[in-house]
Amino acid sequence: MKPLLISACLLGFPCKYSGGSNRLPAEALERLRRHYRLIPVCPEAAGGLPTPRDPSERRGDRVVSCKGRDVTEEYRKGAETALRLARRYGIEAALLQSRSPSCGSGTIYDGSFTGTLIPGDGVTAELLKARGIRVTGNWEELTIG
């Protein structure tokens, strides 16, 4: 069974910035478990940020909290941890939380904290893609067939 890197919050771990999770529906988790060995990661926690924590958004190459704190280094450290896990387990694909400043793939918030979405990737998604790992926020893409 192939390993799949997955945002821990999608599995129900309470690591979302608010202290909650983004748990996928039971049907989705069941289908994923039939196809993959799930390897959870929360890049933000792995980078040293607490839970709960202030919401953050990307502003170009930087990540800034809603209070103006630059948390780029924590996000980069978490992305490197996710990449090490991917290499350790021979991961070819990752299912990451949509729109997140670390995990978002293809669409992220614009850094204004107004809910405005723009094309782009989170820090972790960007690093994984650069290393040839397929990244998606849509579990259905991974369980077809």
Image: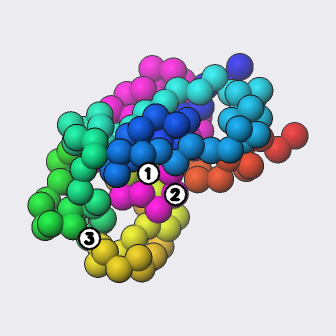
Quadrant in which the N terminus appears: top right
* Magenta segment includes 116: no
Q: Report how far apart the C-alphas of labels 1 and 2 lie in the structure.
A: 6 Å
Residue corresponding to mark 2: 98
* Residue range corresponding to the magenta coloring: 75-101
- The verdict on residue 87 being magenta is yes
Q: Are marks 1 and 2 in contact (CB under 8 Å)?
A: yes
Amino acid at pointer 3? Arg
Residue depicted at x 38% and y 40%: 15
Q: Quadrant of residue 49?
A: top left
Q: Position of residue 52 (x, y in %)?
A: 28, 46
| First along the sequence among labels 1 and 2 | 2
**Mark sitting earlier along the chain (1/3):** 3
Q: Residue at x 73, y 50 (%)?
A: 141
In the rendered image, the quadrant that contains the C terminus is top right
Is residue 143 shown to the viewer in this render? yes
Residue 41 image offset from top left, x and y in percent: 43, 33
Query: Disc 3 marks which residue?
Result: 59
For disc 1, the neighbor class at 10 Å (few under 14, some 14 to 19, many from 20) is many
Which amino acid type is marked by label 1? Cys
Q: Which mark is residue 28?
A: none
The residue located at (15%, 66%) in the rendering is 67
Q: Residues within 10 Å of mark 3 (few under 14, many from 20)?
A: some
**Amino acid type of disc 2?**
Ser
Residue found at the far left of this picture: 69
* Location of residue 103 with respect to 77 vertically, above or below: below
